Amino acid sequence: MSKHLTRPALALAAALAMCGTHAAQVIGVDASAPAAAPVSGHLQLGTATTPKGSALGANNRYLTLDGQPWMPVMGEFHYSRSPAATWEAELAKMKAAGITVVASYVIWNHHEPKDGAFDWKGDRDLRRFVQLCGKLGLKAVVRVGPWVHGEVRYGGIPDWVVDGMRTRGDDPQYLRHVARLYREIGAQLKGSLWKDGGPVIGLQLENEYNLSGPGEGAGHIATLKKLALQAGMDVPYYTVTGWDGAQYPSGQVTPVFGGYVDEPWAVSTTELPPKETYAFRFDSRVSGDLGAQTKSHGPGTAETDIDKTPFLGAEYGAGLPFMYRRRPVVSPDDIASMLPVQLGSGVNLMGYYMFHGGRNPVGGTTLEESSISGGYNDTPAINYDFQAPLGPDGQQRPVLGYLRPFHYFIAGFGDRLAPMTVRKPDVTPAGTQDLRTPRVAVRSSGDSAFVFVNNHVRQYPMPAQSLQFDVKLAGGTVRFPRQAVTVPNGAYAIWPVNFDLDGTRLRYATAQPVARLDGGADGITYVFAAAAGVPVELALEAGGATVETSASGVTEQGATILAVTPGTSRALTIRRAGARPVHLLVLTAEQSRQLVIGEIGGEIGGQRRLVLSSQQAWFEGGKLHLRSVDEPTLRFAVYPAPKRAPKARHPFTARGKDGVFQAYEATLPAVRLTATATPLREARPAPAVMKGGLAKAAIQPIPEAWRSAATWRIDVQPDALKHVDDALLQIDFTGDIGRLFDGTRLADDWYYSGYGWQAGLKALAAKEELSLAVLPLRADAPVYIPKEARPEFGAQAQVARVNKVSLVPVYKVTVELTATP
């Protein structure tokens, strides 16, 4: 099928997709053939063993930790785009979300704005950042560039370098400055590398590099690796981005991949065809266009290396940036539905860009990518929100709750999944625009497997699928469930086949494993999560064990098949002579999105626990931290229940049992905050949006265009932060671009898209009068804004208005729970 359908064809496909549930289909997958053994020894890793003997490794299929399969989850967080005072708490939030490796660019022009004048202090203190990663038990990958892209001016290369020499190749003058940069980075990382017992396990060299020619190509990447080693940066893993025809020296570095659910860098002003990101891949690793700034003219090294390297991810979009000409807003399902697809396609490192939003610092100029400075895209000067799971001010976005259960699954069972190979179903979609054929993949090893299902494609309705599976494994075929199960539009799932529950075989489940909790003498608890709209069926081969359950069930072919109602009560308990009991807890989809898992209690009775809360929750210093936006009543439920009441500055009251969980609640003194917007200047007619730049599409208005902006004075009460953890200034405007000023300092900015703009007062640190400028949005502006947010212009040629300005309190409580009475 062609890569792009015509608009009438897409409309027909969407109409067909809405015609209702397909007739029941049996999806056959032959996973019986043994997979080839992993191949190792051909990848040139750096020193991979710590002083205490812990070792990292890699083969052509997966990573290893101490000789065992290891599947990390990596999240991008740019330290130099975030206040240093918040790093520890923000890293702790990432850890609670299931992130195990933190990746960060070292953005050159943030550190050396002038030749030889390096700045590694404050918000640029790389050493402290990686040390905090180590303190919290997180590993780190440092992306050292020198060109990083990252929507930064000149891709992060300082102006004085760009103006004075040839970049991104083996030019001797350029390499002298790169070598000095690397020595500076090496000095910052000294003592924090894996070989020193530190958290830094990897370096990424360059970014999106597909240049070829004299002094370029694979030879340049080899040169950068040599310079990194000379600077003391000896780490287990060296990576490069593998998409868009990447060029690198095979064996010396390992490619990483990614995918985004829309293309803000595209030039289309309408919805895009269905993205490859939602389609399982059985013979490739690159998920469509990832926005490389340079173009290649043929396959890259990653294509020829596909059998030599593991399938690792680094840039699966946990959100999307807003670019001037295209401003797609994504839903939590748009992002989370990528997980079954990527894992089912063979990914063995789930890496996100970005996981935490931020804001650009300002140097001698603003440091964003722009057409004016020769960039392919126009991006906000300050704001780098990225619709990330954690916002620039540490706020939790709904998507984070949707991702967490998948991260916990990887943490708990990634050692089972990583060695499994991808198996293709008998029938697969004809292409990414085929919205009717079920989207299914299987990964298996021996007699065990996981089935991956996706029935979500952003902006395109999918027909409900009535499915059964025939998975042929080494020990025989497993057909499940008993009757075809309906997978509704928008649903996606990971289901186990022949899954070991500490000695009892779970033949299959139409619910996803999430975690295994060791409760000591109280037994083992396995946590599962239902998929939205999909009934839960479990098939247990209990053997001589006793199964205690209130669920209805039948016995067939040696298995007890149970129809389970998800919730907070135990679905069943398995008791076997001489063994600890095994409990199964199957949460609803909504409950699984409120689930946070971590250790509470520290050195005094510390224990790994399940916490359910609709508010932001994370663990730091052995304590539970709760953060609530605009709601003074904070609630959580915990399992196993503590033996004494929680301790906090604000007392928590026990609210009884919620299934196996103990619920607690505290109400803080309510705070009412005020903010007002007073008009200062009305908008003037805005100039027509120009087209041009490298993309030959709409470009951001030139600075002089701001003469036409409307302006307001923003007043916030002076003691707003007195009784709260933070206060979020929420600016609801309709226009083209909004800019928030602290006096004459540009403090924050935003492209209008319908996605809410927030600025935390702590980070804002305003010292003078706040004001807001809104550049009018013209009715004829050739930019993409989601149809849900595009204003009705009527007879007006433009719009620039403030709908509402509000100040929202952020409450925070730290809770201490101990297991001892």
Image: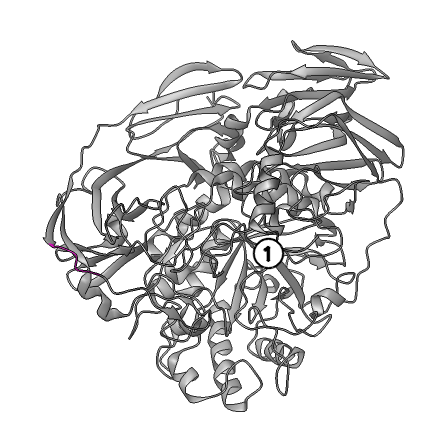
Q: Position of residue 295 (x, y in %)?
A: 58, 72
At x 50% / y 90%, what residue is drawn? 173
> Within 10 angstroms of label 1, few (less than 14), some, or many (20 or more) residues?
many
Residue marked by disc 1: 258
Please identify the quarter of the rendering in which residue 689 is found: bottom left
Q: Quick check: 480 left or right of 463?
A: right
Q: Position of residue 735 (x, y in %)?
A: 27, 52
Q: Position of residue 675 (x, y in %)?
A: 16, 42
Residue 644 visible, this angle? no
Q: Position of residue 528 (x, y in %)?
A: 62, 27
Q: Amino acid at mark 1?
A: Gly
Residue 557 visible, this angle? yes
Please identify the quarter of the rendering in which residue 700 is found: bottom left
Q: Quick check: 455 left or right of 678?
A: right
Tell me if residue 772 comes above or below residue 640 in the rendering.
below
Which colour style is shown?
one colour
At x 49% / y 69%, what residue is drawn? 148
Q: Main secondary structure of the magenta part?
A: loop
Tell me if residue 254 comes above or below residue 757 in the rendering.
below
Observer-nearest residue: 101 or 706?
A: 706
Residue 673 painted magenta? no
Observer-nearest residue: 580 or 65?
A: 65
At x 52% / y 71%, what residue is drawn? 145
Observer-nearest residue: 19 or 761?
A: 19
Number of marks drawn: 1
- Tell me the element at label 1: strand
Q: Quick check: 242 left or right of 315?
A: right
Q: Quick check: 819 left or right of 246?
A: left
At x 65% / y 44%, what residue is drawn? 341
Q: Which residues are magenta?
A: 681-685
